[in-house]
Image: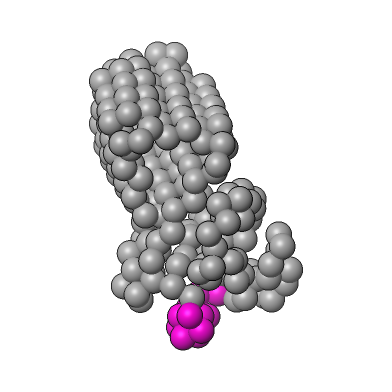
Amino acid sequence: MNKILIWGASGHAMVVSDIIRLQAEYEIVGYLDDINPKSREFYGSVVLGGKDQLKLLRDQGVHDIFLAIGNNDARLTLGEYIKSLGFDLAVAIHPHAVIASDVFVSPGTMVAAGAVINPGCRIGENVIINTSSSIDHECILGDGSHVSPGAHLAGRVALGRAVWIGLGASISDHITIGNGTIVGAGSVVVRDLPDNVVAYGNPAKVRKNR
């Protein structure tokens, strides 16, 4: 069984850890936490320290890392960093997620319990498809995007890089949402949204720039 390191030690890391254990493909050797690197027990394993531990862990035969970090931009930045050090980004897919046979899921992505991804979809790197969300046919999700719990994307939706779709939001078919844009919880998006804005409401409207 391959060894895996989880970068992050918060609630999201607990969800990721549970998925990885259910996959039964990896042995979790521990967690990294740069915010509080003090050695301690955490969710069935231990916090080993911060990123200063990476070289040692690589030398000990750890080649796979999962970034259990909620911030989209941070996931993207750290993903490039760990790849530059020679690590591989793992994929975490809950056994109770439903994914069509032709869906392409890129490295670093998490698909949580109850999520559905329908045919023709392409999922970028370091994406979070959270609990009971749905991605309908032929959607494209850019690197570092996050579809929050209970959010729903209709067919042929395109999310840019580092897009955040809030809790329970709904995105109509053929909608494009620009890079870095945040869609507020419960919103209904019926028109395209540009890059780097915050939009919310029913129908969702641009409220401010980021």
Q: Quadrant of residue 41?
A: bottom right
Position of the N terminus by quadrant: bottom right
Instruction: Give, as a single range, the part of the protein colored magenta.
Output: 50-61
* Residue under the point 56% across and 36% down: 96
Work out whether 34 lies above or below 142.
below
Q: Is residue 121 left or right of residue 78?
A: left
Can residue 204 be spotted in the picture? Answer: no
Can residue 56 be spotted in the picture? Answer: yes
* Residue under the point 39% across and 71% down: 87
Q: Tell me residue 167's x, y (percent).
A: 53, 30
Q: Quadrant of residue 189?
A: top left
* Residue under the point 26% across and 20% down: 174
Work out whether 127 lies above or below 120.
below
| In front of the other: 45 or 23 | 23
| In front of the other: 59 or 191 | 59
| In front of the other: 63 or 183 | 63
Main SS, magenta residues: helix
* Residue under the point 55% across and 52% down: 23
Position of the C terminus by quadrant: top left
